[in-house]
Image (cartoon, grey):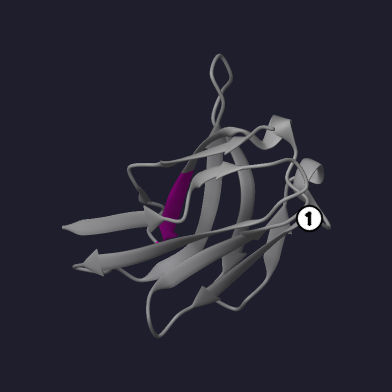
Amino acid sequence: QVQLVESGGGLVQPGGSLRLSCVVSGSIPSIKTMGWYRQAPGNQRELVASITSGGSANYADSVKDRFTISRDNAKNTVSLQMNSLKPEDTAVYYCNLETWSRRMYWGQGTQVTVSS
């Protein structure tokens, strides 16, 4: 069984920074892509950023130049550095991985609140 455990969420003022981390454990499959999604109340879950096994990153337009995704293949971890946070970044953030067989796994989510 595969487990994804996120950490690092919390409350931050606008303009501040947070770093989210996700550790994958268990019967770890061959991972193709790791990433972060978020879901705000009343909204659909959306992709924030993803990164391939080769290190190629993809970002939502709304977070480009503010967020940076990184991945440690040896430690099966993925992180999201979030800078210049805005109130509209408030959401539950979910760690995700996709295997080469196109199976998806999700973490339990971590709350990020940006408010003064």
Residue 20 at what x, y percent from top left?
51, 58
Tell me the SS state at disc 1: loop
- Residue 108 horizontal/vertical position (percent): 33, 42
Q: What's the magenta region?
A: 94-100
Question: Residue flagged by tag 1: what amino acid is it?
Answer: Arg
Q: Nearer the viewer, residue 22 or 58?
A: 22
The residue located at (83%, 58%) in the rendering is 65
Q: Position of residue 7 (x, y in %)?
A: 40, 56
Q: Is residue 46 magenta?
A: no
Q: Main secondary structure of the magenta part?
A: strand
Residue under pointer 1: 66
Residue 25's quadrant in the figure?
bottom left
**In-image side of 32 versus 91 (left or right):** left
**Residue in the image at 16% along x and 58% along y:** 1
* Image vertical order of residue 55 relative to residue 109, above or below: below
Q: Is 114 placed left or right of 45 in the picture? A: right
Residue 80 image-quadrant placement:
bottom right
Which residue is located at x 60 percent, y 78 percent?
Answer: 54
Q: What's the residue at 73%, 56% (across, down)?
A: 83
In the rendered view, would you say 2 is above or below 114? below
Q: Nearer the viewer, residue 101 or 49?
A: 49
Left or right: where 116 falls relative to 102: right
Classify 10 Å Cα crowding around label 1: few (below 14), some (14-19), many (20 and above). Answer: few
Quadrant housing the C terminus: top right
The residue sitting at the left extreme is: 1
